[in-house]
Image (cartoon, rainbow, N blue to C red):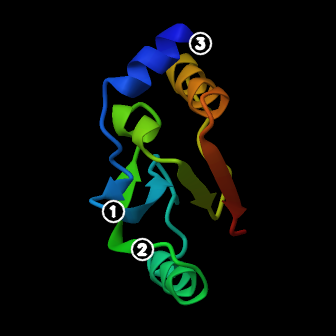
Amino acid sequence: MKAALSFLLAFPAGAQVGDRFEWTQVRYTGAWDPYPEVHREILNFVTQTTSVIVAEGRSETPLKDAKLFSSPMVVLSGRQAPPELDAEEIGRLRDYLTSGGFLWIEDAT
């Protein structure tokens, strides 16, 4: 846990662009992006119904990328099951979730 905390503190909050929340989606080999424009609709809804300030666009990150830990929430979506995760991806995802990260899984089949 201490190693994960040290890792998190080494990177600035990349999910925030200034004071704006940025939509972050997990990118993987395969059909990872079934709704390429849905982030715009969701961020528009968030803007209209909350006081959260959002950044336009989205961030796309593979599980092995360190910027995963800079986002408080990531979306994993697809029209089929994602490829089997390797040991490094499983470890990073476990560290992300146990450090307080939120994973939204969307099955678009």
Residue wearing tag 2: 53
Q: Nearer the viewer, mark 3 or mark 1?
A: 1
Which residue reaches farthest front?
A: 51
Q: Which numbered disc flags the more N-terminal residue, 2 or 3? A: 3
Position above or below: 86 against 46: above
* Residue identifier under label 1: 19
Q: Which residue carries the number 3 mark?
A: 1
Q: Amino acid at mark 1?
A: Asp
- Mark closest to the chain's N terminus, 3 or 1: 3
Amino acid, disc 3: Met
Q: Amino acid at mark 2?
A: Ile
In the rendered image, residue 105, in percent from the top left (x then y), is placed at: 69, 55
Q: CA distance from mark 2 to mark 3?
A: 31 Å
SS category of the residue bearing label 3: loop
Image quarter where the C terminus lies is: bottom right
CB atoms of marks 2 and 3 within 8 Å: no
- Quarter of the picture holding the N terminus: top right
Q: How many marks?
A: 3
Secondary structure at badge 2 equals loop
